[in-house]
């Protein structure tokens, strides 16, 4: 009989195969071949999803992992910008524009970004395959994108990059953004319409400035230094330092990663609470809503060990906040906005996501907490055995929620391989 772990792994492999999209794009005549987040709900190529898919694909076939990144790189623009969505299929455009709050820079791609997970994915591919030729091929556009982020998204030059609308972090409806998005607390069904209204307002405000995107952050409509995004950015900078073949460039990227980590520690850390806060607006007001983002600098192996210990002991393992039966919830259970059962019908307001667990798993290991990492992996597999390969999960019951056969939940393959390797 198959064990629970084997069943989950087989299901994850099925999803990676079933979500594969292949064809020639009617827009640009380019060939595409990638894994989409969900054929029914999310048929396009999303930036951070694809990076997660590439990591998971390493457990299926490293060539598919490389292909995922190569396909994504076709979206890179000459100035370094990389879009948050590539809408390969022309036939699905109208539906996309109706269903998602997106703004396009071109019929083929969005005008917005998502977290730069891609550098970590390429380092993982290199570590698994030793394929230096592949790195030489994909590193130039990735390096340019990190340079674009510095040039266009750090207007106050404090080393932290800013997002200009909530979904640029990938955490579309997180309650940490409610205040700036004018979302009032109230009945759960009121959240989504308010969010849509807020996005409409942002798009209208930004429209006259789209041709010169460097100015948008200065409008201070939604200028947000997000802890999770910046932790991923710092991690990406140090991955590039490991991937480049020029020693000076390695020094530069390593130093930049250190500056981002230092800025997180000096500007976002709250020593009283023992957690990090995002900085909202041009005035950089700490956004004191406790979400998993507040723990995310754990993914950085050079994070001050004292801070790492406080994050783990006081928050991650706190059964009133994050250490629920199926951790790690996207919002601490102590927050009034915590919505584990998905009553708001929108994302990132309580349920548990596998990409978050994957990052925190490796962060825990980097900080010498293999015991907790293993426990987290075990509960994640248990949750997926119960709930299937879903978009997110009820942190109290493990029930699967959101899209079915969801792409990045297949990161469980990496957790399983890591646990098997360490057995
Ligand atoms: C949702 C998520 C976002 C993800 C996208 C595709 O919008 O909030 O992070 O990239 O779906 O899966």
Image (cartoon, grey):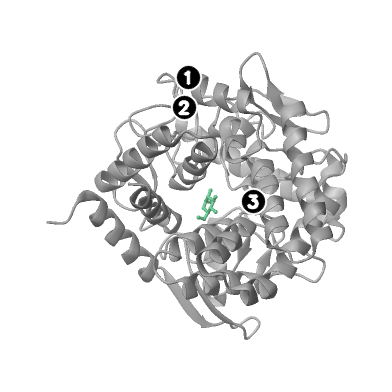
Is 187 located above or below residue 164 in the figure? above
Give the mark count: 3
Answer yes or no: disc 1 within 8 Å of ligand 1: no
Residue 385 in picture, x, y percent from top left = 26, 47
Residue 211, numbered label? none
Relative to 391, is 106 on the left or the right? right
Bin the neighbour count of mark 2 within 10 Å (Cα to Cα): few under 14, some 14-19, many 20 and up: many
Contact between marks 1 and 2 (CB within 8 A): the answer is: yes
401 left or right, relative to 144: left
Determine crowd level at label 1: few under 14, some 14-19, many 20+ residues with C-alpha closer than 10 A. Answer: some
> Is label 3 within 8 A of ligand 1 (CB to nearest ligand atom)?
no
Residue at 60 percent across and 63 percent down: it is: 122
Instruction: From the viewer's side, name the closer residue of 145 and 83.
Output: 145
Marker disc for residue 115: 3
**Residue found at the very far top of the displayed protein:** 272
Q: Which residue is mark 2?
A: 338
Q: Position of residue 22 (x, y in %)?
A: 48, 79
Please name the residue that numbered disc 1 is placed on: 334
Q: Quadrant of residue 138?
A: bottom right
Left or right, 359 with respect to 40, comes to: right
Counting residues from the start of the chain, the first of labels 3 and 1 encountered is 3
Name the one closer to the observer, 243 or 66.
Answer: 243
In this orientation, does residue 346 appear? no
For label 1, the SS is loop
Q: Mark 2 or mark 3: which is in front?
A: 3
Q: CA distance from mark 3 to mark 1?
A: 27 Å
Q: CA distance from mark 1 to mark 2?
A: 7 Å
- Where residue 386 appears, x then y in whole percent? 25, 44
Dot in front, 1 or 2: 1
Q: Residues within 10 Å of mark 3 (few under 14, many from 20)?
A: many
């Amino acid at each position: 009989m198959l064990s629970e772990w084997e069943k989950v792994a087989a299901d994850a492999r099925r999803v990676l195969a079933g979500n594969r999209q292949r064809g020639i794009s009617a827009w640009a005549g380019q060939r595409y071949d990638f894994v989409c987040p969900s054929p029914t709900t999310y048929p396009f190529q999303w930036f951070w999803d694809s990076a997660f898919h590439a990591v998971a694909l390493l457990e299926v076939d490293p060539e598919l992992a490389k292909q995922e990144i190569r396909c994504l790189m076709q979206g890179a623009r000459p100035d370094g910008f990389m879009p948050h969505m590539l809408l390969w299929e022309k036939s699905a455009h109208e539906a996309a524009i109706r269903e998602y709050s997106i703004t396009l820079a071109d019929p083929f791609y969005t005008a917005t970004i998502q977290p730069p997970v891609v550098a970590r994915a390429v380092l993982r591919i290199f570590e698994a395959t030793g394929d230096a030729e592949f790195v030489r091929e994909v590193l130039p556009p990735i390096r340019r994108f990190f340079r674009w982020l510095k040039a266009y998204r750090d207007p106050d030059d404090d080393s932290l990059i800013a997002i200009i609308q909530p979904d640029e972090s990938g955490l579309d409806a997180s309650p940490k953004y409610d205040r700036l998005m004018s979302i009032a607390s109230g009945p759960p069904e009121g959240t989504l319409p308010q969010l849509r209204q807020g996005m409409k307002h942002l798009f209208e405000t930004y429209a006259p400035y789209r041709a010169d995107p460097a100015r948008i952050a200065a409008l201070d409509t939604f200028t947000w230094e997000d802890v999770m995004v910046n932790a991923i950015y710092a991690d990406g900078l140090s991955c590039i330092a490991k991937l480049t073949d020029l020693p000076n460039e390695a020094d530069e990227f390593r130093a930049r990663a250190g500056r981002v980590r230092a800025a997180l520690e000096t500007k976002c850390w709250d020593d009283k609470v023992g957690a990090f806060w995002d900085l909202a607006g041009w005035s950089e007001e700490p956004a004191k809503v406790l979400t998993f983002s507040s723990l995310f600098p754990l993914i950085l192996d050079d994070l001050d060990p004292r801070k790492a210990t406080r994050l783990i002991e006081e928050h991650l393992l706190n059964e009133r906040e994050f250490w629920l039966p199926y951790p790690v919830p996207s919002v601490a259970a102590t927050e009034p906005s915590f919505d584990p059962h998905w009553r708001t019908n929108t994302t990132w307001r309580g349920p548990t996501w596998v990409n978050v667990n994957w990052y925190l798993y490796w962060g825990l290991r980097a900080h010498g907490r293999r015991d907790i990492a293993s426990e987290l992996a075990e509960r994640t597999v248990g949750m997926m055995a119960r709930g299937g390969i879903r978009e997110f999960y009820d942190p109290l019951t493990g029930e699967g929620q959101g899209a079915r056969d969801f792409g990045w939940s297949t990161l469980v393959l990496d957790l399983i391989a890591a646990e098997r390797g360490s057995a």
